Image: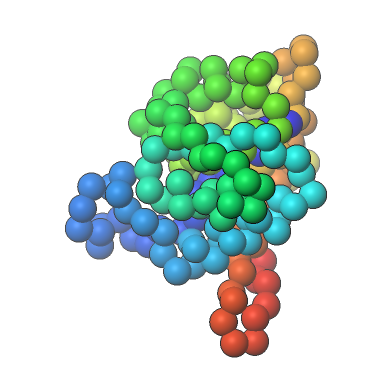
């Protein structure tokens, strides 16, 4: 199984005064990153691969601390990655129980290709910030998918989980 995660909210890139790769998570995105720990608590995770951008790394850092695992940046999960690069990562048979944290554009390219190749979804095709797709591959290049919406944790006064 692969867990395909879209990075958490990083605010509006038009208001960020720096290289986009350095744009951090917003407060909402940090809550989504904390929520990812609870959202994935019932799933095994052996590795965490992510886009080299700060916002992707910050999204999976709480999960990495919880497991304890190392976050491994991978250019093939970057915003500029081609569909072929992302598919090569996706079909890598050595990856098992791995989180792949990336960008909306990258997730869109991967999911659209999987649908073209025969993936049938019970849920609508969507990938909001902080969401996860559970993708189970088999030897015949068939994929089963399940969508998990983002879970944002607010740890302030009156702490509650928000979905």
For this rendering, which residue is in front, 124 or 31? 31
Q: How is the image coloured?
A: rainbow
Q: Where is residue 52 in the image (x, y as percent from the top left)?
A: 39, 38
- Reply above or below: 95 against 44: above
In depth, the one of 73 and 106 nearer the eye is 73
- The answer to whether any part of residue 118 appears in the image is yes
Q: Which residue is drawn at 48% across and 61% down?
A: 29
Q: Position of residue 109 (x, y in %)?
A: 50, 30
Q: Count up the numbered dots.
A: 0
Q: Report the residue that reaches farthest toward the top.
A: 140
Q: Which residue lies furthest to the left in this view?
A: 17
User: Looking at the picture, does residue 163 appear above or below residue 41?
Assistant: below
Where residue 160 sits, quadrant-wise, is bottom right
State the image coordinates of residue 156 (x, y, percent, origin top left). Answer: 57, 82
The residue depicted at 54 percent of the width and 39 percent of the height is 70
* Residue 114 appears left or right of 43: left
Q: Name the quadrant of the C terminus.
A: bottom right
110 to the left or right of 159: left
The residue positioned 60% from the left and 66% from the top of the image is 152
Left or right: 161 in relation to 9:
right
Foreground of the two, 82 or 29: 29
Quadrant for residue 114, please give it: top right
Please indicate, yes or no, whether residue 149 appears anywhere in the rendered image.
Answer: no
Picture layout, residue 49 above or below residue 140: below
Q: Compared to 64, does 157 lie above or below?
A: below
Q: Which residue lies furthest to the front in this view?
A: 68
Q: In which quarter of the image is the N terminus?
A: top right
Residue drawn at x 36%, y 56% as measured from the top left: 24
Residue 4 percent coordinates (x, y): 61, 39
């Amino acid at each position: 199984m692969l867990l395909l995660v879209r990075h958490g909210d990083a605010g509006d890139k038009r208001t960020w005064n720096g290289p986009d790769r350095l744009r951090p998570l917003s407060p909402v995105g940090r809550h989504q990153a904390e929520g990812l720990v609870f959202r994935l608590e019932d799933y095994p995770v052996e590795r965490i691969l992510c886009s080299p951008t700060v916002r992707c790394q910050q999204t999976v850092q709480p999960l990495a601390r919880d497991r304890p695992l190392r976050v491994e940046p991978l250019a093939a999960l970057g915003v500029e990655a081609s569909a072929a690069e992302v598919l090569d990562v996706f079909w890598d048979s050595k990856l098992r129980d791995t989180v792949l944290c990336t960008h909306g554009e990258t997730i869109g390219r991967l999911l659209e290709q999987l649908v073209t190749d025969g993936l049938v979804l019970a849920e609508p095709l969507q990938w909001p910030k902080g969401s996860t797709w559970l993708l189970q591959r088999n030897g015949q290049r068939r994929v089963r998918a399940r969508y998990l919406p983002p879970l944002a944790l607010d740890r302030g006064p009156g702490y509650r989980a928000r979905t």
